[in-house]
Amino acid sequence: DSGVTQTPKHLITATGQRVTLRCSPRSGDLSVYWYQQSLDQGLQFLIQYYNGEERAKGNILERFSAQQFPDLHSELNLSSLELGDSALYFCASSPGGLAPEQFFGPGTRLTVL
Amino acid sequence: AQSVAQPEDQVNVAEGNPLTVKCTYSVSGNPYLFWYVQYPNRGLQFLLKYITGDNLVKGSYGFEAEFNKSQTSFHLKKPSALVSDSALYFCAVSVNNDMRFGAGTRLTVKP
């Protein structure tokens, strides 16, 4: 158990809908990262927050947004969902410091029908 | 921009034999390199990392990795494979907190 929690575990929704994925980092970790894992695209970095502020941005679509709250939990919002958004979405957290390792949550499996 | 390549989609070894999972990288400046493992239906787990210093890095579960600057490689190794090592392995490079992962290599260890 990495100490990172994600809810829900599974999510099934329809095209055009909007969903919110939630992540609670390990106790004491200030950084939260979001990743998308799909069969054809592999593991793609989406976005990173550090202590409430956006720190780095990867291949995140404009339909997707995220935020990190004062209690350090984070939410990833996916809107106008398309079939291609079906994937595993992972959250990871890390402490500060030089090139810290990331601790991954169990993921949320999103299925868009 | 940094990138990492894992040239083998699949690696098969017999239990007890040494294993190597290959990784090459491209980055401006000094690389921070990582290996992660993913078991079925689980998130990624950190194995080891290289920041600076000794080129041979030891990590969890008996794994080690060798940093080779001239060949821009960071291959993962284990002297004696176990069936339980069968999983998906990811190499990653980090620059300015932007971590890029390789496509992954599926390791299968047969009894």
Image (spheres, rainbow, N blue to C red):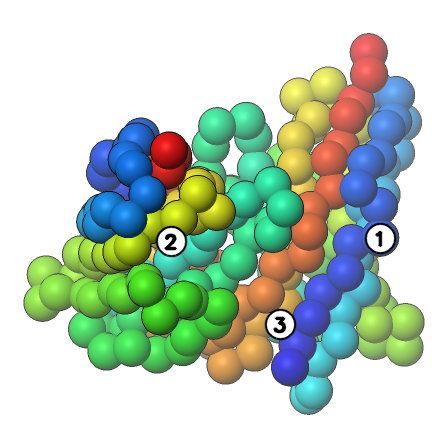
Q: Is residue A15 above or below residue B82?
A: below
Q: Is residue B70 above or below residue B56?
A: below
Mark 1 or mark 3, earlier in chain:
1
Q: Is residue A11 above or below residue B64?
A: above
> Is residue A10 left or right of B68 when viewed as pictured?
left
**CA distance separating discs 1 and 2:** 26 Å
Q: Mark 1 lies on which chain?
A: B
> Is residue A49 left or right of A41 when viewed as pictured?
left
Image quarter of the N terminus of chain A: top left
Q: Mark 3 lies on which chain?
A: B
Q: Mark 2 lies on which chain?
A: A
Residue at horizontal 59 percent and vertical 65 percent from the top: B100
Residue at horizontal 60 percent and vertical 41 percent from the top: A39
Residue carrying label 1: B7
Residue B79 in the image, given as x and y percentages of width and height: 84, 36
Residue carrying label 3: B32
- Does residue A10 show up? yes
Residue density around tag 2, few if under 14, some if 14–19, many if 20 or more, within 10 Å: many
Q: Nearer the viewer, mark 1 or mark 2?
A: 1
2 and 3 marks in contact (CB < 8 Å)? no
The single residue placed furthest to the front in the displayed view is A16
> Residue A92: which numbered mark, if any?
2
Residue density around tag 3, few if under 14, some if 14–19, many if 20 or more, within 10 Å: many
Dots 1 and 3 on the same chain: yes
Dot 1 falls on a residue whose secondary structure is loop
| A47 vs B15, nearest the viewer | A47
Image quarter of the C terminus of chain A: top left
Total marks placed: 3
Residue density around tag 1, few if under 14, some if 14–19, many if 20 or more, within 10 Å: some
Q: Nearer the viewer, mark 2 or mark 3?
A: 2
Three-letter amino acid code of the residue under disc 3? Tyr
